[in-house]
Image: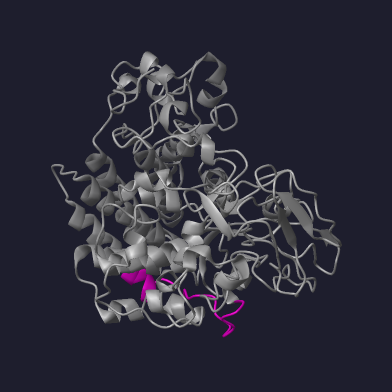
């Protein structure tokens, strides 16, 4: 039999109805910790993803997502994998049968905590996308009336998520008892609570949402409390990866093959294995010319401070600085995020510059890129990667804490010193102080924000954008801050003063020749390339200006009345007329 309506299944999806019922005799399963552990392993699949490949207003790739196309190009889909409920049914199956079938109460409590962690994680994704969604905490079958239930309020769902995550925090093992960073722990549960409470609190604040129950301040305080508990060390020793090398520590963090080697920064990760032939494609995505073609934006690059803590965008003429000049004396994380002068691929000795066949803005990201060969050269990493991928890391918790405190109006210097300033110290940067005036750059219509004028909050947003780039946070940040207009800002890259030759690698030799349309193509040698202006490269002022990401002409305006929530797939509303479509979305 097939699910309909709420679970979003049609006849062709009937295999989901019998999964895992066709493989597990539920009345005789979940009788031991090993059976519950094996069953719950499938829950971890919802953590899998490629954070390096997500897009936002700081980074674009070859093919734009629907979220960035916005406008009329974004329509209500007939179906969507985002409106998927099979994982929830499997979670609820364990929660229903384990207490009845297993005589080991400690095992039942532990794996119920695992299941409730994942139920909170599952519902956070749904609330982020759709707002109000049906809350389901038991197995449903095809004759169940609740399949046709309406959407519950986000307040009810968030309250249930809090119940789940608090149970998980209380009953999951800590990092001393569970040393596998790919397994959920108390620390992972605290990090998840910190994340979804920050999202909910700021979303309600900036969107002006008032619901019966808890207010936005409550959720921000919950974020603060969860973050402080994790930061206290009570539930495990977490810390920033810091070997005292500010010129390389940030970059090196994301080249660790095993999450355990991050010295406590990765709280939860997705593991990859050469032995099991489990790889991802971060390397070829960043350096190959037939995959992602990721390009960082000038908006992000210009936001990095100078090494002495002053603002780059306060320097006279910053808008027309060529690449080599704008890279000088900046926050060391900039050269650990993109190919700056002197760049060498991790663990290699050849200096390379941006490859414009890969990255159209001139800002080519290097995060997650490792050496071409690892493990005594027995594993070729040319087109695949083994590095464990972060789900939660300690740096994010520090940023969550500082932002929540600032949004509550209670940020102190002591708060900054145990959060933001730890990140800055790792990078060799001066401390942030409270009482910042708002940076005009971060308020500008071309590069900044529209709904926040607070100097300290803006500085925390700057730090968040820099520290968490390519970790699938920025787009969701824009939604919760009600800053969708940022997507409409120009997608510019490095500045080109017109026909010229530029040394971008810092070796004293030209790496790229920009030549005028119709003129003779210059001869080049070695790895240098020649680009015809207007044909091979587009500039904002036609014959000079900022490089323009090739998507610039395709972008459409973010719809303030619609695009902060996703549309419910039309097939689901046809199957369940009690589901009401989100505002602004029509067939």
The spot of residue 107 in percent (x, y) is: 46, 54
Q: Is residue 164 above or below residue 335?
A: above
The spot of residue 204 in percent (x, y) is: 23, 48
Predominant SS along the magenta part: loop
Of residue 142 and residue 534, the one placed in the foreground of this image is 534
In the image, farthest residue toward the front: 519
Q: Which residues are magenta?
A: 227-248
In the image, farthest residue toward the bottom: 244
Identify the residue at image location x=40%, y=65%. 462
Image quadrant of residue 341?
bottom right
Identify the residue at image location x=42%, y=57%. 106
The spot of residue 333 in percent (x, y) is: 54, 72
Image quadrant of residue 296?
bottom right
The spot of residue 258 in percent (x, y) is: 65, 66
The answer to whether residue 384 is left or right of residue 432 is: right
Residue 467 visible to the viewer: no
The figure's colour scheme reads one colour
Residue 378 visible to the viewer: yes
Count of all numbered marks drawn on residues in the image: 0
Of residue 92 and residue 531, the one placed in the foreground of this image is 531
In the image, farthest residue toward the left: 212
Q: In which quadrant is the C terminus drawn?
A: top left
Q: Is residue 377 above or below residue 32?
A: below
The answer to whether residue 330 is left or right of residue 526 is: left
The answer to whether residue 447 is left or right of residue 503 is: left
Identify the residue at image location x=57%, y=64%. 180
Of residue 460 and residue 381, the one placed in the foreground of this image is 460
Residue 129 magenta: no
């Amino acid at each position: 039999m097939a699910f309909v309506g709420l679970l979003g299944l049609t006849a062709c999806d009937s295999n989901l109805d019998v999964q895992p019922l066709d493989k597990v005799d539920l009345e005789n399963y979940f009788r031991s910790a090993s059976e519950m552990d094996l069953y719950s392993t499938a829950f971890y699949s919802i953590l899998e993803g490629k954070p390096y490949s997500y897009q936002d207003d700081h980074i674009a790739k070859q093919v734009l997502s629907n979220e960035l196309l916005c406008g009329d190009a974004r329509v209500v889909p007939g179906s969507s994998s985002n409106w998927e409920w099979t994982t929830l049914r499997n979670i609820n199956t364990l929660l229903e049968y384990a207490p009845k079938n297993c005589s080991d109460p400690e095992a039942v409590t532990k794996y119920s905590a695992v299941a409730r962690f994942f139920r909170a994680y599952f519902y956070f994704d749904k609330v982020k996308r759709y707002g109000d969604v049906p809350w389901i905490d038991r197995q449903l079958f095809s004759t169940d009336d609740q399949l046709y239930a309406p959407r519950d309020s986000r307040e009810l769902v968030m309250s249930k998520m809090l119940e789940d995550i608090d149970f998980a925090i209380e009953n999951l093992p800590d990092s001393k008892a569970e040393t596998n960073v790919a397994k959920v722990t108390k620390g992972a549960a605290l990090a998840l609570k910190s994340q979804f409470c920050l999202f909910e609190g700021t979303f309600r604040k900036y969107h002006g949402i008032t619901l019966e129950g808890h207010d936005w301040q409550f959720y921000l305080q919950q974020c603060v409390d969860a973050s402080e508990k994790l930061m206290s060390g009570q539930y495990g020793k977490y810390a920033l990866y810091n070997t005292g090398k500010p010129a390389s520590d940030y970059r090196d963090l994301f080249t660790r093959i095993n999450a355990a080697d991050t010295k406590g920064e990765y709280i939860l990760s997705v593991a990859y294995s050469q032995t099991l032939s489990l790889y991802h494609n971060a390397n070829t995505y960043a350096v190959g010319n037939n995959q992602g073609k990721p390009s960082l934006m000038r908006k992000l690059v210009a936001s990095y401070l100078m090494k002495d803590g002053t603002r780059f965008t306060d320097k006279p003429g910053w808008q027309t600085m060529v690449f080599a000049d704008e890279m000088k004396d900046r926050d060391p994380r900039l050269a650990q995020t993109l190919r700056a002068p002197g760049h060498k691929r991790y663990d290699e000795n050849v200096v390379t510059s941006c490859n414009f066949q890969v990255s159209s803005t001139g800002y080519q990201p290097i995060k997650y890129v490792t050496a071409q060969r690892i493990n005594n050269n027995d594993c070729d990493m040319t087109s695949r990667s083994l590095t464990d991928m972060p789900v939660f890391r300690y740096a994010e918790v520090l940023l969550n804490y500082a932002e929540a405190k600032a949004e509550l109006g209670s940020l102190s210097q002591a708060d900054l010193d145990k959060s933001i300033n730890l990140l800055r110290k790792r990078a060799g940067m001066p401390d942030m102080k409270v009482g910042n005036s708002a940076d005009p750059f971060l308020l500008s219509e071309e590069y900044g924000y529209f709904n926040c004028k607070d100097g300290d909050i803006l500085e925390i947003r700057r730090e968040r954008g820099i520290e968490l780039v390519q970790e699938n946070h920025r787009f969701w940040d824009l939604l919760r801050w009600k800053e969708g207009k940022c997507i409409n800002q120009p997608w510019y890259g490095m500045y080109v003063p017109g026909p010229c030759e530029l040394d971008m690698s810092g070796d004293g030799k030209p790496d790229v020749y920009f030549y005028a349309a119709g003129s003779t193509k210059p001869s080049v040698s070695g790895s240098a390339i020649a680009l015809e202006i207007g044909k091979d490269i587009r500039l904002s002022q036609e014959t000079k200006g900022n490089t323009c990401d090739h998507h610039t002409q395709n972008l459409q305006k973010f719809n303030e009345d619609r695009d902060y929530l996703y549309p419910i797939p039309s097939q689901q509303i046809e199957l369940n007329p009690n589901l009401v479509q989100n505002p602004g979305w029509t067939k």
